[in-house]
Amino acid sequence: MANTYFSFKEFIVHQDKTAMKVGTDGVLLGAWANCDKAKKILDIGSGTGLISLMLAQRTENAAIDAIEIDDSAFGQMQQNFELSPWKNRLTSIHMDFKHYSTTSGNKYELIVSNPPFFINSLKNECNKKSLARHTDSLSFAELISGIDMLLAENGIFCVILPATEKSSFIELAKTSGLNLTRCLYIKPTPSKPAKRILMEFSLSKSVCIEEEIIIEDSGRHGYSNEYKELTKDFYLAF
């Protein structure tokens, strides 16, 4: 049974009311996304609010909107925001992203998403977890279409996906004029191929900076120095 909360250095994420718990993917995205110049940030499919909370910790004045469609996850996110040191900069939005993207009229310098990514695969028996993990509720094409409407001219979009989805996602992004500018391959161990990829897109064209990180390089829980450096502001163990 998963813990009902997860403690980080500067905030706590309660997760007893939502199907999707705190995981490595969200932590990686929240730590890696470039938020240096962002005054207004959007977190799509925010779940417990983990990534929004991480970005709030990393910024001084950024206003962060977090959108979540699931009732239970939205309530949990509101709770986590209210208990955080940055509640005045965090706004929770209970809405379908497709509707929000066509009606809000907002523009963001940074948009992040840890989206549903299991395509055409067997659905989980838990409906809430299935909704969060499968693309039926928000396809990649619909996600990119919404990004196209909400991203500021000088903005960036950061996403984490299975490494196998890289090529198809990049091709979809190109249809909206989004160019891959930075990517980080995530390898679980030195001997295994990358399982995840972090990608940054921009409306500007530039040579893509490609890097690689290994999570565990010396056995179980033997975390690499690079992984520790990336996440040290958040994990209590580092």
Image (cartoon, rainbow, N blue to C red):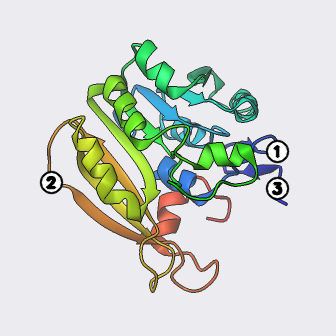
Residue at 64% across / 82% down in the picture?
220
Residue 204 image-quadrant placement: top left
Instruction: Residue 137 in the image: state x and y as whole percent.
Output: 56, 37
Comes first in the chain, label 1 or label 3: 3
Location of mark 1 (residue): 16
Task: Tell me the element at label 1.
Answer: loop
Residue at 36% across / 24% down in the picture?
150
**Residue 33 visible in the picture:** no
Location of mark 2 (residue): 207
Residue at 64% across / 42% down in the picture?
131
User: Which amino acid is tagged 1?
Assistant: Asp
Q: CA distance from mark 1 to mark 2?
A: 43 Å
Location of mark 3 (residue): 3
Residue at 62% across / 20% down in the picture?
88
- Comparing 56 with 151, the one in front is 151
User: Which amino acid is tagged 3?
Assistant: Asn
